[in-house]
């Protein structure tokens, strides 16, 4: 991630929301600690089939 | 040790769990669970249903509940022993004790004082609660107190992994708490549905529960779809750091051996604690009554004595004497209640306080103990189904009461046996299409008006809402929207799920052992009433004796009619002594002139009456049982009617049965199965069933969850029949008819009781038409016709009906000379209290002298007074309604003195209004007629069709002209829809009854015509129909080809009034 390996997976959580709208949300979130020591949150967007980094996390 | 789910919700966690207990059971078996616990919120409503379903699918059920404590925290409680089960029932009962502080108000949520739980912990295991609201999460100190009370063997800290943010931190804290308390952890899943497919519905239910939209309850929703029952191995994977907690679930489950399906220790009060054995007490009661009933010379005393001895012998053998004494005691109580309710009315006191229905009518012991009012010896009723030597459970006894007596009796029974020992049976309202459309549509934020329109169109089955949507004119737009698509899918998923608990119409359970230790008991909506958390099927499974105390509108009407007759004519009619062969009454019945008569007034009954032409009480017994879903699906109706006709033409005709072995059992019903008892007789005669086996078959047929059980009897039936020389195919064919008949038929004895009431009501209707009409109107709502049609029918038979009048009317409808005066209660928005107060003031202070006097004296609100004027109840003041309304607006009213809570009123100065009344136009005939319908739901004046008639297309036939038309000719007819019927048994055909100024006519709307004109059929009060006039035997119908609304025409003719919105809506029956 950002060309750094993940050192530690702190937590995984799932969000399924707004499935009744034009913009359904289906995500798997991961709070990780990178090798460099930063905490970051990334998520897999299952609707779009892509990975994202949570901004401001 | 494999994982076991110990925390699982069914749909009996109302508006939270999204799956039925059976669905959970099936899925658990599929996923490889050997054991599963059900832990619904604060209740055991679905526990017995779940226990039976789980066992049927090879899953061992554990009983439990998730309890809400007074601070709102949750704990999960599981039953280890039978003592624990009793404690859980008591705890849940206690949690509900204060949920209904005020009648009519919303109930409060159940809440359990933690100290109660600490006291009654024996035999229970406590888990520390769920991830969000668990006690350990919200209040660790309180959890510690519980842990001390339960001890380390029976208290566990609950770990859950719902894939929410914060799971890691929470579970770490919980592990630390468990260590500190010295108790183990246990993993649970908190499942809310059996399958991922239901997870969206679970979201929507949360919105419904919180009365908001999905968008509006993000905090309350679970946030993802992980709270679903998943395989044990998949569950274990969710807890990689807690293998011990996962294993603990399995180990704990193995300990929880309590089996709810086994004997609970229920006993009804059986009089075994008296000085004499119960059978001696019962014999004495019967002997005493026997001398009274059979004392005179009435021909069958000898047979009756033999029958009584035989029954008492059987009752003694079965140990059921206490059972009959219990009912006798309840009925004695009813007698006291009746005396209190009826007051000094001598006329009503001649009548018994209630009467039996169902199979109990076949018993002479019931006759003698006052449970039934049909002499079974004279009426030749068999005892078979009610009592037999192979009886597996106690028979049901159903008793019908006039409504006012029943209301008080339910409370009296609860008080007599004690609030810990008696309660009503529950009933669960399940989702049908209207509720589904409204609730789910609101959750999805769909437009209200469109939902209402759709709700009016649907036929009752939520699974078909998707098809209904697809058939809409704007289907393409709708289905392009994810909200509407989700709506259709959710409607299909919600079908049949329970929405809330309510009370059964009158079933009561009485127990010697405190009932509150066998099933939780909670207050019902009406003050003084309480209900247990099981429905009639669960009560039956538990072996509870159910006594049905039912309210029957016609009994109320008949009682009141007798009272009116006594008041007007000074005659006391004893209905048990009226002639049972009155020719005039049978003439009415044979002519299908039966609007308002009990059971034989519906459109289908009328059409059948014209062909069966009942001649005596036995015929009426068949008649009330014949036009029912059972005989219709059992293909009995047409053969019966045809054979009856042939028999009339040829008295030597011998009706054929399906097999010679059935000749005898089906002789009285011309070779077809009409009564439920005949199912038993057919099974015994054709397939050699024992009485017990046949009763088992009948029970399987009368329950809603037993298709498999019914099929299980088939092999035995066919084999038995073949053994008696019946062809295999024939045997299957007969069994199919029995299955078609299923539970939807009356036992003969029930039909006999109803047939008698049908006759008595017809007799009163013929001989006392005005009194009967007044009584029927006061007993509304009941029966097939709206009050407006009852009035028109009575007018056609020469009864004069007078409109409500503030200076003449009573609160209720009463006789005024020969005429019926409509009561003030019929004026909309004037309740019975208002009406009585207005009459009371008139009796105290004299007639109202005008509208000013009325306003200043009548204790009613301005809306009610306006309604009185608009309805015509003030026409006798001699001014047009518009002027009266104008005056009403100007009169000052007495004001309440502030600070006296309405106790003191400041009188208004009786000054006349000073403003001039402008010239107001007179009301037109249309306006007056619509005001009548609009304000009183009926009109005694001109019929709308009379006003419309001159404007109808030429050649439109009235009900007077229609019978003159040639059969199979094309006709045009018009009228006001009064009833609409879409029977489940008629393949989509809709039957309509139209009324005009002369009478009623029948329309048959075939399915394809219905589809084309559905909005007209369902919503328009005034219709024009074109089609073929069919005369078959004495029946006349118009087979409709085209329909038209007369709404626009009426609107124009009436000078721009909205006619359609004001006329009464047709009564609807059957599927929508």
Image (spheres, grey):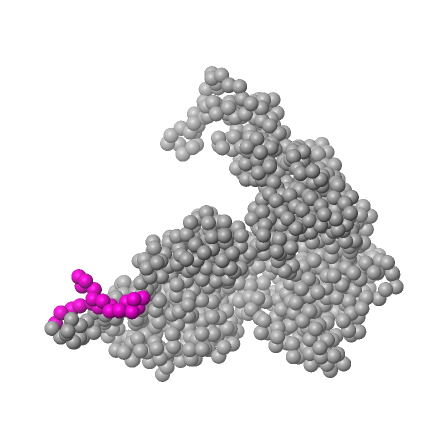
Q: Quadrant of the C terminus of chain B?
A: bottom right
Q: Is residue B666 or residue B293 the one in the foreground?
A: B666
Which residue shows up at 73% across the image and 71% down it?
A: B681
Q: Quadrant of residue B699?
A: bottom right
Can you see residue B479?
A: yes
Which residue shows up at 56% across the image and 48% down it?
A: B1015
**Magenta segment, which residues?**
A37-57
Q: Is residue B254 left or right of residue B775?
A: left
Q: Is residue B198 left or right of residue B951?
A: left
**Residue B102 in the image: x percent, y percent?**
44, 48
Residue B110 magenta: no
Q: Quadrant of residue B208?
A: bottom left
Q: Is residue B520 left or right of residue A48?
A: right
Q: Quadrant of the N terminus of chain B?
A: bottom left
Is B275 situated above or below B1002? below
**Residue B354 in the image: x percent, y percent?**
66, 53
Q: Is residue B944 or residue B548 the one in the foreground?
A: B944
Which residue shows up at 52% across the image and 28% down it?
A: B858
**Residue B734 in the image: x percent, y percent?**
71, 72
Residue A45 magenta: yes
Can you see residue B167?
A: no
**Residue B301 in the image: x percent, y percent?**
81, 61
Q: Quadrant of residue B736?
A: bottom right
């Amino acid at each position: 991630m950002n060309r750094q390996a993940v050192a530690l997976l702190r937590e995984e959580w799932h969000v399924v929301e707004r499935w009744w709208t034009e913009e359904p949300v289906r995500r798997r979130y991961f709070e990780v600690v990178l090798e460099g020591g930063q905490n970051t949150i990334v998520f897999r967007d299952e609707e779009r089939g892509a990975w994202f980094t949570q901004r401001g996390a | 040790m494999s994982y076991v789910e110990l925390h699982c919700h069914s749909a009996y966690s109302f508006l939270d769990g999204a799956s039925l207990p059976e669905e959970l059971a099936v899925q658990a078996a599929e996923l490889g669970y050997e054991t599963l616990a059900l832990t619904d919120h604060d209740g055991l409503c679905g526990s017995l249903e779940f226990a039976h379903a789980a066992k049927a699918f090879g899953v061992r059920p554990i009983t439990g509940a998730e309890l809400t404590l007074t601070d709102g925290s949750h704990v999960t409680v599981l039953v280890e022993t039978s003592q624990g089960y009793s404690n859980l029932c008591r705890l849940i009962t206690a949690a509900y004790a204060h949920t209904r502080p005020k009648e009519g108000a919303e109930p409060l949520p159940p809440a359990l004082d933690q100290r109660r739980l600490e006291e009654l912990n024996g035999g229970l295991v406590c888990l520390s609660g769920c991830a969000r609201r668990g006690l350990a999460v919200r209040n660790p100190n309180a959890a510690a107190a519980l842990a001390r009370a339960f001890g380390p063997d029976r208290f566990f800290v609950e770990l859950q992994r719902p894939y929410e943010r914060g799971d890691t931190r929470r579970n770490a804290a919980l592990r630390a708490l468990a260590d500190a308390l010295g108790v183990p952890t246990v993993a649970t899943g908190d499942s809310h549905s059996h399958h991922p497919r239901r997870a969206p519905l679970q979201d929507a239910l949360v919105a419904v529960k919180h009365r908001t939209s999905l968008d509006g309850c993000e905090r309350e929703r679970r946030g993802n779809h992980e709270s679903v029952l998943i395989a044990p191995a998949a569950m274990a994977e969710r807890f990689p750091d807690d293998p011990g907690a996962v294993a603990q679930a399995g180990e704990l489950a193995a300990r929880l051996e309590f089996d709810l399906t086994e004997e609970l220790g229920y006993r009804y009060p059986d009089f075994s604690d008296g000085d004499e054995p119960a059978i001696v007490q019962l014999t004495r009661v019967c002997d005493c009554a026997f001398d009274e009933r059979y004392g005179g010379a009435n021909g069958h005393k000898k047979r009756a004595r033999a029958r009584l001895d035989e029954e008492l012998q059987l009752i003694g053998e079965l140990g059921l004497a206490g059972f009959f004494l219990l009912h006798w005691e309840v009925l004695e109580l009813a007698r006291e209640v009746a005396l209190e309710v009826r007051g000094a009315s001598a006329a009503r006191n001649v009548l018994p306080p209630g009467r039996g229905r169902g199979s109990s009518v076949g018993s002479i012991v019931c006759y003698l103990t006052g449970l039934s009012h049909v002499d079974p010896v004279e009426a030749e009723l068999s005892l078979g189904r009610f009592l037999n030597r192979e009886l597996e459970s106690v028979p049901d006894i159903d008793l019908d009461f006039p409504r006012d007596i029943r209301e008080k009796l339910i409370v009296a029974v609860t008080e007599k046996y004690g609030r810990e020992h008696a309660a009503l049976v529950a009933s669960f309202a399940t989702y049908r299409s209207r509720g589904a459309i409204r609730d789910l549509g609101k959750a999805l934020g769909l437009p209200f008006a469109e939902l209402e329109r759709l709700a009016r169109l649907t036929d009752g089955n939520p699974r078909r809402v998707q098809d209904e949507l697809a058939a809409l004119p704007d289907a393409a737009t709708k289905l392009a929207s994810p909200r509407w698509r989700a709506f259709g899918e959710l409607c299909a998923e919600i079908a049949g799920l329970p929405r809330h608990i309510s009370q059964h119409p009158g079933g009561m359970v009485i127990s010697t052992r405190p009932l509150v230790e066998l099933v939780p008991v909670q207050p019902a909506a009406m003050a003084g009433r309480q209900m247990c958390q099981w429905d009639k099927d669960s009560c039956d499974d538990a072996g509870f004796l159910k006594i049905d105390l039912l309210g029957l509108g016609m009994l109320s009407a008949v009682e009141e009619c007798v009272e009116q007759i006594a008041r007007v004519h000074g005659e006391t009619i004893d209905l048990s002594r009226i002639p049972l062969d009155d020719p005039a009454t049978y003439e009415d019945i044979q002519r299908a002139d039966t609007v308002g008569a009990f059971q034989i007034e519906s459109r289908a009954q009328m059409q059948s009456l014209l062909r069966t032409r009942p001649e005596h009480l036995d015929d009426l017994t068949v008649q009330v049982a014949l036009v029912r879903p059972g005989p219709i699906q059992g293909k009995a109706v047409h053969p019966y009617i045809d054979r009856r006709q042939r028999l009339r033409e040829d008295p030597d005709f011998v009706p054929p049965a399906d097999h010679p072995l059935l000749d005898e059992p089906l002789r009285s019903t011309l070779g077809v199965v009409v009564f439920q008892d005949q199912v038993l007789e057919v099974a015994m005669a054709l397939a050699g069933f024992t009485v017990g086996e046949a009763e088992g078959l009948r029970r399987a047929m009368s329950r809603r969850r037993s298709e498999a059980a019914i099929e299980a009897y088939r092999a035995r039936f066919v084999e038995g029949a073949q053994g008696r020389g019946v062809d295999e195919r024939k045997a299957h064919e007969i069994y199919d008819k029995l299955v078609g008949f299923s539970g939807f038929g009356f036992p003969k004895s029930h039909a006999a009781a109803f047939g008698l009431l049908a006759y008595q009501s017809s007799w009163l209707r013929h001989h006392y038409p005005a009194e009967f009409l007044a009584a029927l109107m006061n007993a509304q709502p009941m029966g097939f016709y709206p009050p407006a049609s009852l009035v028109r029918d009575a007018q056609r038979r020469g009864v004069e009906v007078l409109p409500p009048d503030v200076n003449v009317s009573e609160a209720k409808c009463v006789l005024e000379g020969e005429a019926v005066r409509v009561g003030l209660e019929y004026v909309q928005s004037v309740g019975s209290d208002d009406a009585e107060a207005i009459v009371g003031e008139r009796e105290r202070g004299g007639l109202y002298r005008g509208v000013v006097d009325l306003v200043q004296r009548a204790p009613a609100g301005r809306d009610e007074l306006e309604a009185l004027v608009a309805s015509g109840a003030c026409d006798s003041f001699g001014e047009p309604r518009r002027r009266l309304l104008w005056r009403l607006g100007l009169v000052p009213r007495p004001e309440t003195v502030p600070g006296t809570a309405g106790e003191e009123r400041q009188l208004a100065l009786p000054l006349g209004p000073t403003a001039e009344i402008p010239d107001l136009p007179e009301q037109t005939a249309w306006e007056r007629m619509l005001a009548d319908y609009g304000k009183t739901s009926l009109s005694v004046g001109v019929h709308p069709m009379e006003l419309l008639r001159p404007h109808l297309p030429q050649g439109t036939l009235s009900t007077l002209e229609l019978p003159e038309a040639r059969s199979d000719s094309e006709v045009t007819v018009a009228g006001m829809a009064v009833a609409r019927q879409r029977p489940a048994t008629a393949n989509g055909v809709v039957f309509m009854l139209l009324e005009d100024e002369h009478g009623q006519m029948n329309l048959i709307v075939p399915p394809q015509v219905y589809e084309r004109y559905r909005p007209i059929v369902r919503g328009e009060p005034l219709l024009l129909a074109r089609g073929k006039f069919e005369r078959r035997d004495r029946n006349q119908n118009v087979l409709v080809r085209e329909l038209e609304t007369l709404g626009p025409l009426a609107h124009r003719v009436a000078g721009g009034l909205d006619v359609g919105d004001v006329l009464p809506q047709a009564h609807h029956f059957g599927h929508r």
